[in-house]
Image (tube, rainbow, N blue to C red):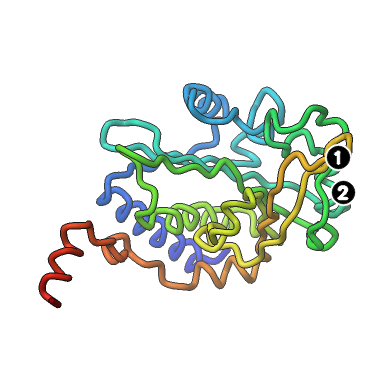
Amino acid sequence: MTALNLYTMIVNVANITKELETAGMRLEIGGDFVAYRRLRNAQADRAPLYPMFDVSSSYVDAGNAFWVCGFNDKDELVHTQAIRRLDMASETLGEHINSHRHKYITPNSTPDPDRTFYSQPPALDRITGQVCYHGEFWLKGGDGGHRSQGFTALLSRVVFELALKIWAPDYVFGFVPMPLAFKGIPVRYGYTHCEPGTWIGPDKQITAEEALVWMGRSDIVQFLDTQPMALSHERRIPDRRELMNKMSVVA
């Protein structure tokens, strides 16, 4: 990492952080996954913490992972995401997931995790080397939340900027439920590849449908080289009164 690259990353993350703070979200970044587990367990309305980022299930700490949390002006948790580095120098992603599937299966989605497997995406046999798993992405909606306001792309940039400079991964991957993949959510995250996949249970039944989303290092660099759209420039959807006024003017 050159001094210029490090300085560029610092400036980029600082600008995003400032943009988010102006819009009402304060970020915290950390590597204490005991503290992260405590934050997640306090969210009764969310699915349980994924095992890959749970200190009670995985060896995860500041040496191989970090988390990003966002808080609103009431100090309420409104955003989470986490990323961890995985050494796959001697195996493919498909082999890795097969060996560690318990840590990737959505909690309570299958009657028997021991006999549930992920299949189909061609990239499973291609992704190898230094690989990062990106997960736990959540953004609160409704009152006090920030969905549909342009936050997603900026928040994912923070993680990719830091991961690229800390670990220089060969690949980054994650899982997205198929209904969200069909809506184009992976593109908002910045992912350039999205491959449909299924979790197959013990009786050959489909227990979950999740797309494998991934990027190579060059994809990450290209994504970060593009200028993000500022939140203040996001297209605002007019409310019903504005639409009626416009219709009256046209009439």
Residue highlighted by disc 2: 95
| Residue 27 drawn above or below residue 173 | above
Q: Please state which amino acid type lies under the numbered disc 1.
A: Ser
| Residue 189 drawn above or below residue 97 | below
| Quadrant in the picture for the N terminus | bottom right
Q: Nearer the viewer, residue 1 or 149?
A: 149
| Circle 2/circle 1 CB separation < 8 Å | yes
| Residue 249 drawn above or below residue 191 | below
The residue at 35%/54% (across/down) is 149
Residue 99: assigned label:
1
The residue at 17%/62% (across/down) is 242
Say few, some or many: other residues with alpha carbon within 10 Å of mark 2 (under 14 / 14 to 19 / 20 or more): some
Residue 111 relative to residue 56: left or right: right
Q: Residue furthest front?
A: 251
The residue at 64%/71% (across/down) is 218
Q: x and y percent of residue 154 in the render?
A: 42, 57
Say few, some or many: other residues with alpha carbon within 10 Å of mark 1 (under 14 / 14 to 19 / 20 or more): few
Residue 227: assigned label:
none
